[in-house]
Structures are given as C-alpha cells and as structure tokens.
Image: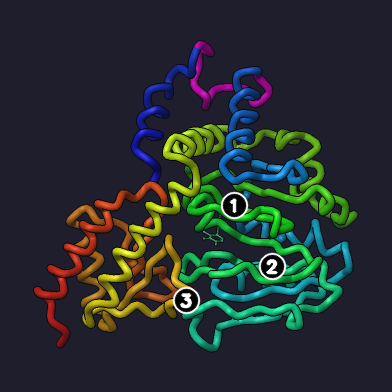
C-alpha cells in the first residue's frame, strides 16, 4: 500500500508539478525542477533514517535482485571472499548470485532445515575472519521472519537487504556497511532501488564489471550517471514527507508494533489458524499463518479478496496466507482482517 495522502498529492500534481508547466513524468532528469526533487528526497531520507554523513545515498534501478550481483561485484575485492547468512528465499538468491559469479562465498548460517521458521543466531566465530562482508536479509518477506538483533561481525561490514522492512522502524545505520532495498514494498512504487553505502566501501569494485552496477560511479554522479527512476524517486520523496509529518520512524514503529501485536495476539489466542514463525523471529511487516488445509486456504484468500482484503495469499513457494501490513496499512485494516478471520473460522470448520 501507499499512504492515501501521498496518492492524493501525486494525483493533484500529476498533470502539472508546481510552476514547472509539466508532469514530473515529463521532466528531464537534468532540469532544475527535477534536480530539486531528487536532492530533497535524499535530504529527507537522511533526516528520517539519521544517515551519517560518511554514507552515500543512491537511488538506482534494477530492483533489489540486481543488488544481489552488485554487492559482491562492489565489495568482494576487499579480501576476495564473503560470507552469507541464508534465512529465506531472497538471502538464498543473493548467495546463489554471488556463487554464480564465481566468487569464493560460503553460507555461514542457515535455517533452511527448519523451514526458515526463525532466523539463525549468528556469532563472530561463525564468520571467516577475512570475509569482505557478511550478507543477510533483515526481514524475510516470504516467511515472515525478521532479525530481532543485529549480528556482531566486528570490523567486517554487514550488508543488509532491507527491502521489506525499510522505514518501518528506526535502524542504526552505522552498524551496517551497506543497506539496500527495492522501493516497492514500503517506500514507493516499483522502479527505484535504494542503496546506502559507507563511503570507504566504494573502493573495492571489480575492474571488469558493468558500469551501471558500480556504486562509486553512481555516487560520484549523484545517482545520475544515466536516467534515474525519476517518478519513483519523486513518490519516495512524498512518502518520506508523509513519514516526517507523522513524527518520523519512531512514531511509525509505534503504529506498526501495535498493528502486529494485535494480529499476533489474535493468532496466539485461537487454534484454527497457526502461525509457523517462532516468536522471537516474528516480522512486524509480514505476518504468515496457515489453516493446514489447502481447500480452505484457497477459499480464505478468495473470500477475503471479495471483502476488499487483498493480497492475502501466501507466496507461491510456501502457500498458506501472508498479511503484509506495511507502513501505509492502517490499524483499522488489521482489525477488519481479524474480524474476517473470526467469521471465516466459524463458517468453515476444519473437516
Ligand atoms: C521483494 C524482495 C526482493 C526482490 O526485490 P526486486 O526489487 O523485485 O528485485 C528482494 N529482497 C527482499 C527482502 C524482498 O522482499
């Protein structure tokens, strides 16, 4: 979801942005009007996330999946090897991509054997001391798990895919070497990928690599080496302004905690639905649950959709249900979902 006030503002200035005489969609990315938009987006994100000056903010294309390749291509030159924590589908894909490129990467910890029902407990001794970086996915969108802690990797930079939890709560950026996120889960419409990278990590890129994947080139050109995803960045700026207006990420986190607590409390208080995720690893953004009967789960998703409760079907790889309660989902949305779940359970007893 995107916040309604953001969509309304975008609609109001869709045809003509300010005094520019044109839509943001029509602007040259090198025009003063657009330069102001992208600069403002960065300034506001820096305030929101309290990003230290020693970090660069990049607005790129290609989605989080492109960063699965960009991360090793930019960083593995530090020492020639890297370690991965595999806690779900996307971190597995990131690991495989680095392998595919022929790099010396190992999986330092995984919860695959446990169906990814919780995240691994990672300690320093599990990491190769000469790893260039440690990669993890902070919130596992499909399984509905989240790291309740930031692994201590000492001086080894931690690289985090935060696609599905970015801006959901405050995060200490200084604990990470790189944070990246596709915009479309919690930030803006699809098209933009955010990369926040510590400046000293820009010097290890492979000599032979696509220019478009080189963070340093993008940083030196203010994300404008080529045409950036202009409209998505503009929408992100509106979302940043909306969040600042709410009181920033602390205020947003309070609302998100309240929404997630309500749904988990309901799940814990009944037996019809089961929440597969271990309590200490529960995601605040993606809440997964199952009935344990495929026909009933199919009926659940269909009936929920007919009631205006959309996108509740679990990811095709795991089945069951998943309620993604991102920032823009109001508390009342979760209340409505629970009311529907109660009704459905009553009307559809297990065979
Ligand atoms: C959705 C998602 C991705 C994939 O993002 P794209 O922008 O589609 O490439 C990667 N990682 C996480 C954690 C995601 O939720």
- Residue tagged 2: 135
Q: Confirm or reject: label 2 Cβ below 8 Å from ligand 1.
A: no
As for residue 22 lying within the magenta part, the answer is: yes
Q: CA distance from mark 1 to mark 2?
A: 17 Å
Query: Residue 128 placed where, x, y %?
Result: 81, 78
Lower position in the chain sequence, tag 3 or tag 2: 2
> Magenta segment range?
19-31
Query: Residue 279 placed where, x, y %?
Result: 42, 77
Give the vertical position of 135 relative to 333 (above or below).
below
Q: CA distance from mark 3 to mark 1?
A: 29 Å
Mark 3, other Cα within 10 Å: few <14 / some 14–19 / many ≥20: few
Tell me which corner region of the image, top left, top right, bottom left or bottom right, holds residue 303.
Answer: bottom left
Tell me which corner region of the image, top left, top right, bottom left or bottom right, holds residue 339.
Answer: bottom left
Marks 3 and 1: CB-CB under 8 Å?
no
Which label was assigned to residue 63? Answer: 1
User: Which of the two residues, 328 or 60, is positioned nearer the viewer here?
Assistant: 328
Q: Secondary structure at mark 1?
A: helix
Mark 2, other Cα within 10 Å: few <14 / some 14–19 / many ≥20: many
């Amino acid at each position: 979801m995107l916040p309604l006030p953001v969509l309304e503002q975008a609609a109001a200035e869709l045809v003509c942005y300010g005094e520019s005489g044109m839509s943001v969609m029509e602007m040259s990315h090198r025009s003063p009007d657009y330069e102001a938009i992208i600069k403002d987006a960065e300034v506001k994100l820096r305030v929101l996330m309290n990003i230290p000056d020693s970090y660069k903010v990049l607005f790129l294309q290609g989605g989080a999946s492109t960063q699965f390749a960009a991360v090793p291509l930019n960083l593995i030159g530090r020492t020639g090897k890297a370690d991965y924590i595999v806690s779900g589908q996307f971190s597995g894909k990131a690991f495989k991509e680095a392998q595919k490129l022929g790099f010396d990467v190992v999986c330092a910890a995984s919860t695959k054997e446990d169906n990814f029902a919780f995240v691994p407990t990672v300690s320093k001794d599990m990491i190769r001391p000469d790893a260039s970086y440690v990669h993890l996915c902070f919130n596992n969108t499909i399984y509905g798990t989240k790291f309740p802690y930031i692994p201590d990797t000492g001086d080894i930079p931690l690289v985090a895919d935060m696609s599905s939890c970015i801006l959901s709560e405050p995060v200490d950026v200084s604990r990470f070497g790189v944070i990246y996120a596709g915009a479309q889960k919690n930030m803006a419409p699809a098209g933009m990928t955010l990369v926040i990278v510590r400046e000293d990590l820009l010097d290890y890129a492979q000599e032979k690599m696509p220019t478009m994947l080189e963070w340093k080139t993008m940083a030196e050109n203010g994300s404008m080496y080529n045409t950036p995803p202009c409209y998505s960045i503009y929408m992100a700026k509106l979302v940043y302004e909306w969040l600042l207006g709410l009181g920033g990420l602390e205020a947003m986190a309070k609302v998100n905690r309240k929404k997630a607590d309500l749904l988990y409390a309901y799940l814990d208080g009944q037996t019809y639905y089961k929440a597969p995720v271990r309590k200490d690893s529960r995601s605040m953004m993606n809440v997964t649950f199952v009935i344990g009967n495929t026909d009933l789960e199919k009926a659940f998703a269909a009936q929920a959709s007919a009631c205006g409760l959309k996108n509740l079907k679990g990811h095709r790889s795991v089945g069951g249900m998943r309620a993604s309660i991102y920032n823009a989902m109001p508390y009342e949305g979760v209340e409505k979902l629970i009311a529907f779940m109660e009704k459905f359970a009553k009307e559809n007893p297990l065979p």
